[in-house]
Image: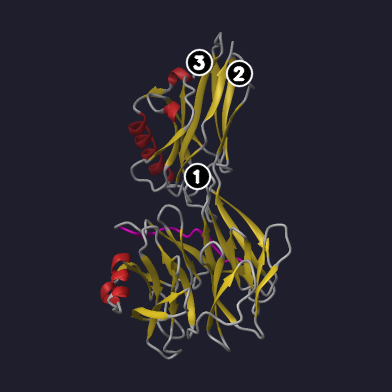
């Protein structure tokens, strides 16, 4: 194969690191895209009155101002709660496999513990003034953010709510307005708070972290934690209306001030940093209000161009006539070869589509058909590569350039093999914005 002989073979990690770093330097000369690459989304319309939406294993749960409804896929909805008059929905969160926790404010500030099957409760679980958000803390307790001192209070409270008794215990009190909550995979509590006034100046929102061990000790003492017990994750944000962790330690948030979905990368690590927005609604007719990360069962992580796995559910609304849920997933690039199977002697082409606009990549090729992939981390990039075991040792490598549609092609020549020879090909690439990705490996037969 004349073109294949022109490839340069070397240890994989070193070679990929060098080539992709050079590609990144070249790609940085190209302006970043206005619409994030490497993602795909679908929109699901909701009734115009819906203000809260939650995906559960039992189906979609929504609230429209007076009614909480569970709608299993392909089935009619079931009313979980019917209120006598309009209220403002604060939150809907999963509270174990069989319940959701629903909070509201307005004429009545209450929290309900709703079974997904069986009769609705006749009374709220608890009455919590100006409740704002909640997360499940343990199988039998939730952490609730609320401005229990009323609108004029300078502080916001975090309360532990017992899901069996409805009792609450104050565990954190910090200055600022009510803010959203999220719990990291290691149990640490993340809380965003900002300026306690109207209008809120930009740059006054801070994301705090309370270590789980410290929180648990405060509950046992009992003791109320404050700012002195918190760690600052990121400060200077314009707003954070809702929080959600993805599956690789990034914290996603609704920046309602700028109408976008922001991201704090490596929020669980020692050096969190503010990444580019995941979705920008600045020119859209709707606004994002809540985010929910729905884990998947596969091996990919929630990063652009990765194998599709978990998804982000975003509630969008114009606050009048439009309410809908948007699901965002990673969209991997695709690699294919011309010539059928086996590929006859002569020219054939490896083509990559759905890749990065004007990005740069590396084609790896080896006479090996070992199945399966492993995770390869390239220094300087947040995204991992799901890389083929067949391409571990000394694959032949060549660089390629992607066009403005995210496509790239490499023309090769098969000199002919009898019997047919099994090979594996895969493409790694970097986008103009410095995002790393790879196609799935493909197996080919080179025939006579």
Q: Is mark 3 on a helix, strand or loop?
A: loop
The residue identified by callout 2 is 343
Is residue 1 positioned above or below 245 on the image? above
Counting residues from the start of the chain, the first of labels 3 and 1 encountered is 3
Q: Which residue is drawn at 35% across and 64% down?
A: 188
Answer yes or no: do the residues labelled 2 and 1 have beta carbons within 8 Å? Answer: no
Position in image of residue 48 (x %, y %): 69, 72
Q: Is the magenta stretch mostly helix, strand or loop?
A: loop
Colour mode of the rendering = secondary structure
The span from disc 2 to disc 3 (Cα, nearest Å) is 12 Å
Position in image of residue 275 (x %, y %): 41, 58
Which mark's residue is nearer the viewer, 2 or 3? 2
Q: What element carries label 2?
A: loop
Q: Residue furthest left?
A: 228
Is residue 161 positioned above or below 54 on the image? below
Q: Is residue 264 visible?
A: yes
The residue identified by callout 1 is 306
Are there few (<14), some (14-19), or many (20+) residues within 10 Å of tag 3?
few
Position in image of residue 80 (x %, y %): 64, 72
The span from disc 2 to disc 1 (Cα, nearest Å) is 28 Å
Which mark's residue is nearer the viewer, 3 or 1? 1
What residue span does the magenta drawing correspond to? 271-284
Are there few (<14), some (14-19), or many (20+) residues within 10 Å of tag 1?
many
Residue 89: image quadrant is bottom right
Position in image of residue 306 (x %, y %): 50, 45
Q: Residue at x 46, y 47 (%)?
A: 432
The residue identified by callout 3 is 1
């Amino acid at each position: 194969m004349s073109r294949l002989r022109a490839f340069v073979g070397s240890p994989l990690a070193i070679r990929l690191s060098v080539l992709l770093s050079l590609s990144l330097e070249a790609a940085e000369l190209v302006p970043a895209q206005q619409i994030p690459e490497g993602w795909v989304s679908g929109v699901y319309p909701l009734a115009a009155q819906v203000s809260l939406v939650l995906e559960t294993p039992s189906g979609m749960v929504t609230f429209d101002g007076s009614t909480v409804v569970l709608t299993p896929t392909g089935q009619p909805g079931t009313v979980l709660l019917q209120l006598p008059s309009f209220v403002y929905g604060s939150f809907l969160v999963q509270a174990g496999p069989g319940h959701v926790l629903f909070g509201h404010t307005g004429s009545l500030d209450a929290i309900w513990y709703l079974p997904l099957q069986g009769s609705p409760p006749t009374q709220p679980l608890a009455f919590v003034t100006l409740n704002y958000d909640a997360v499940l803390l343990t199988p039998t307790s939730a952490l609730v953010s609320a401005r229990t001192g009323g609108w004029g209070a300078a502080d916001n409270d975090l309360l532990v709510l017992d899901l069996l008794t409805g009792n609450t215990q104050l565990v954190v009190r910090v200055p600022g307005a009510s803010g959203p909550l999220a719990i990291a995979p290691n149990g640490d509590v993340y809380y965003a708070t900002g300026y306690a006034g109207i209008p809120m100046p930009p740059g006054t929102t801070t994301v705090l972290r309370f270590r789980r061990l410290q929180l648990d000790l405060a509950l046992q003492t009992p003791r109320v934690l404050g700012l002195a017990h918190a760690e600052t994750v990121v400060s200077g944000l314009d707003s954070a209306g809702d929080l959600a962790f993805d599956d690789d330690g990034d914290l996603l948030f609704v920046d309602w001030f700028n109408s976008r979905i922001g991201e704090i990368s490596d929020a669980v690590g020692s050096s969190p940093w503010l990444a580019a927005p995941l979705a920008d609604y600045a020119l859209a007719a709707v606004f994002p209000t809540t985010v929910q990360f729905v884990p998947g069962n596969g091996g990919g992580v929630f990063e652009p161009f990765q194998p599709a796995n978990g998804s982000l559910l975003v509630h969008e609304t114009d606050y009048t006539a439009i309410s809908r849920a948007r699901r965002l997933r990673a969209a991997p690039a695709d690699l294919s070869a011309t010539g059928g199977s086996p590929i006859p002697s002569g020219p054939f082409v490896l083509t990559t589509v759905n890749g990065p606009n004007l990005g740069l990549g590396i084609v790896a090729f080896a006479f090996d058909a070992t199945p399966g992939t492993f995770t390869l981390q390239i220094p300087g990039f947040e995204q991992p590569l799901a890389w083929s075991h067949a391409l571990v040792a000394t694959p032949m490598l060549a660089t390629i350039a992607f066009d403005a549609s995210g496509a790239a092609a490499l023309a090769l020549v098969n000199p002919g093999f009898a019997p047919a020879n099994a090979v594996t090909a895969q493409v790694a690439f970097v986008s103009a914005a410095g995002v790393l990705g790879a196609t799935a490996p493909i197996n080919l037969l080179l025939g006579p």
